[in-house]
């Protein structure tokens, strides 16, 4: 089949593409690199001018005056330039409701063009969209990414501003268009299932594909000191619950100064981020999740012990009651300190959980197996 993948978050579409290529399909991936992460694309719509030294000057001035990022407009213009070539694909998949990440009117115009030029188009529920934000605002879950917002943390409000962009009338037009015209919606992990339950467009969950062959998998090696890594993304530090990890690490450093080596980074490109977590035994990922995000899964594939979403729903879904594949991180500093302390004082537990994690990723997230699940669903729908 000839397949078009539009948009990228956390390398999901890149790994899916690699799985589809392994199955013999022809794939074109269009994206803007997902900001500082700079993920690969066959056709890049990354903002070049407004992120250059010259273009950044009017961009900053415009943003201060109108609170609008001109780089978003450039994404849309670059997509428009190449959009006429994006036709006659057997299947098109959109990473979420804003795969191009431009202004709403232009996003809708460009998406309509993609629909006019192609037949089968599928939508992913991956990241923030109208359905997930609406669900979180109803507070139906034990906790969610919006906990800091509900708790009124003043510094957190900026990070949640874009959540409400998905509730505006201009975006709701995009949402309704996609749900009325796409062949269906696929959830990328368990955190996106609850908002879709009962929706006639919901096609089910296909777990994130992880390219085991590319990133490699090996049992973690523990040296004189246990290495703990926290990679902070400034744009979503509150939604990830990063502050709980930061406070816990201060306590751990004081408690075990001769037993641990702690590394904290901020806003690294994907390739640089990988270099740091290669060396780590323990990765601190997120606290507000039922399931794992993409960084967590890649770390698990390498035999790291990851503090991430591993709630009861996750254990039940994958039948993991007997096999611990990661640490279920909670928004509780004392709890995180307790779990870290147990691992530091019992290094054999790091090896045990790491081995379980590798087996889990190979069984449930192998990129070729998961790519075949997409193909089967696309063909059956």
Image (cartoon, grey):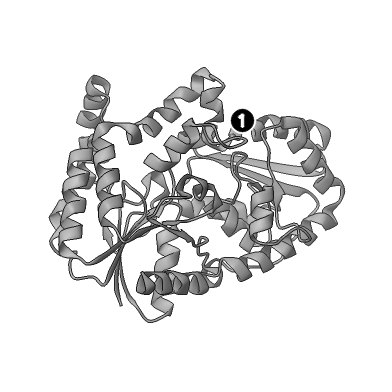
- Side of 346 where 172 appears, left or right: left
- The quarter of the image holding the C terminus is bottom left
Q: Answer with left or right where residue 224 lies relative to residue 2.
A: right
Question: In the image, what residue occupies the spot 34% across and 33% down?
Answer: 167
Viewer-side residue, 146 vs 14? 146
Please say whether residue 25 is visible from this viewpoint. Answer: yes
Q: Nearer the viewer, residue 242 or 194?
A: 194
Q: How many marks?
A: 1
> Residue 79 location in percent, x, y?
20, 52
Q: Is residue 69 left or right of residue 188?
A: left
Is residue 50 in sight in this rendering?
no
Residue at 50 percent across and 24 percent down: it is 156
Q: Is residue 236 left or right of residue 61?
A: right
Considering only vertical position in the picture, is 376 above or below 6? below
Residue 169: image x %, image y %? Answer: 26, 32
Instruction: Give the residue pinned by disc 1.
Output: 243
Position in image of residue 22 (x %, y %): 43, 78
Indicate the secondary structure of the residue bearing disc 1: helix
Question: Which quadrant is home to the N terminus?
Answer: bottom left
The quadrant in which residue 321 appears is bottom right
Where residue 216 appears, x then y in whole percent? 59, 69
């Amino acid at each position: 089949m000839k397949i078009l993948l539009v948009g990228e978050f956390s390398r999901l579409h890149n790994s899916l593409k690699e799985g589809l290529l392994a199955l013999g399909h022809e794939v074109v991936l269009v994206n803007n690199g997902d900001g500082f992460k700079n993920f690969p694309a066959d056709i890049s719509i990354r903002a070049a001018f407004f992120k250059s030294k010259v273009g950044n000057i009017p961009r900053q001035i415009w943003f201060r005056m109108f609170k609008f990022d001109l780089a978003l407009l450039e994404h849309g213009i670059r997509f428009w330039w190449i959009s006429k070539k994006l036709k006659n694909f057997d299947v098109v998949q959109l990473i979420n409701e804003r795969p191009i990440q431009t202004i709403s009117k232009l996003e809708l115009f460009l998406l309509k063009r993609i629909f006019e030029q192609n037949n089968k188009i599928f939508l992913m529920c991956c990241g923030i969209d109208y359905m997930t934000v609406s669900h979180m605002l109803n507070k139906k879950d034990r906790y969610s990414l919006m906990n800091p917002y509900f708790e009124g943390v003043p510094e957190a409000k900026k990070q949640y501003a874009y959540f409400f962009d998905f509730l505006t009338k201009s975006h709701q037009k995009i949402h309704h268009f996609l749900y009325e015209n796409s062949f269906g919606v696929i959830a990328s992990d368990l955190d996106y299932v609850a908002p879709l339950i009962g929706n006639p467009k919901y096609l089910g969950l296909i777990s994130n594909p992880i390219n085991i062959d590319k990133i490699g998998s090996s049992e973690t090696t523990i040296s004189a000191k246990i290495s703990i890594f926290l990679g902070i993304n400034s744009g979503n530090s509150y939604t990830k619950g990063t502050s709980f990890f930061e406070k816990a690490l201060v306590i751990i450093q004081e408690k075990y100064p001769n037993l641990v080596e702690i590394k904290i980074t901020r806003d690294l490109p994907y390739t640089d981020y990988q270099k740091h977590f290669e060396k780590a035994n323990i990765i601190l990922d997120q606290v507000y999740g039922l399931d794992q995000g993409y960084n967590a899964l890649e770390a698990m594939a390498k035999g790291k012990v990851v503090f991430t979403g591993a709630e009861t729903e996750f254990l039940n879904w994958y039948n993991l009651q007997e096999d611990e594949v990661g640490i279920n991180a909670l928004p509780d500093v004392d709890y995180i300190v307790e779990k870290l302390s147990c691992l530091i004082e019992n290094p054999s537990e790091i090896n045990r959980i790491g081995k379980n994690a590798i087996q889990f990723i190979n069984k449930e997230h192998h990129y070729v197996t998961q790519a075949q699940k997409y193909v089967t669903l696309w063909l059956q729908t």
